[in-house]
Amino acid sequence: MSLKLLIDMNLSPQWVSVFERSGWEAKHWSKVGDPHTTDRAIMDWAKKNHYVVFTHDLDFGTILAVTHADGPSVIQIRTQDVLPNHLETVVITALRQYETLLKAGALIVIDESVSRARILPLNR
């Protein structure tokens, strides 16, 4: 099964075409849900529909840590310039590197120079 990526409101809808060009299904939250809903509701939707959350918001990782949830997988971008023209290569490389972990359940943190993975559920 190919990855399905749900792009959070804090990231550009331009990411949809970036991911689709790389062979993954992608949706921007503004097209599937209420833009003003809670992060928890987005997480619930993503888990129910088998999507990986792609975000710049640290709250998603916090939700995973506090709840010890086994999904959905989350990819967090940790840099100021989050536009595809700046980060596309770094993000696509990390997604390919961690695709198997993302399918199983993981938190992937990506910045401009390094990416790292933690398997879900997150333990203290």
Image: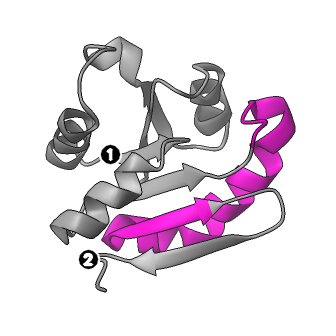
Q: Nearer the viewer, residue 96 or 42?
A: 42
- Disc number placed over residue 75 in the picture, else none: none
Say if 57 sits above or below 32 in the image: below
Q: How much space separates mark 1 and mark 2, taking CA atoms?
A: 16 Å
Q: Nearer the viewer, residue 55 or 62?
A: 62
Task: Report if residue 107 lies within the magenta region.
Answer: yes
Task: Report if residue 43 lies within the magenta region.
Answer: no
Secondary-structure class at tag 1: loop
Say if 53 sits above or below 124 in the image: above
> Is residue 11 in sight in this rendering?
yes
Mark 1 surroundings: few (<14), some (14-19) or many (≥20) residues within 10 A: many
Residue that carries the numbered disc 2 in the rendered image: 121
What amino acid is at disc 2? Pro
**Discs 1, 2 touching: Cβ within 8 Å:** no
Mark 2 surroundings: few (<14), some (14-19) or many (≥20) residues within 10 A: some
Q: Is residue 103 left or right of residue 45?
A: right
Q: Nearer the viewer, residue 88 or 58?
A: 58
In which quarter of the view is residue 33 placed?
top left
Image quarter (top left, top right, bottom left or bottom right) of the N terminus: bottom left
* Picture coordinates of residue 4, whole percent (x, y): 40, 44
Residue that carries the numbered disc 1 in the rendered image: 51
Q: Is residue 121 left or right of residue 75?
A: left
* Picture coordinates of residue 30, whole percent (x, y): 39, 14
* Picture coordinates of residue 38, whole percent (x, y): 24, 29
Q: Is residue 117 left or right of residue 50?
A: right
As drawn, which residue projects farthest toward the bottom?
Answer: 124
Secondary-structure class at tag 2: loop
Q: Which residues are magenta?
A: 80-109
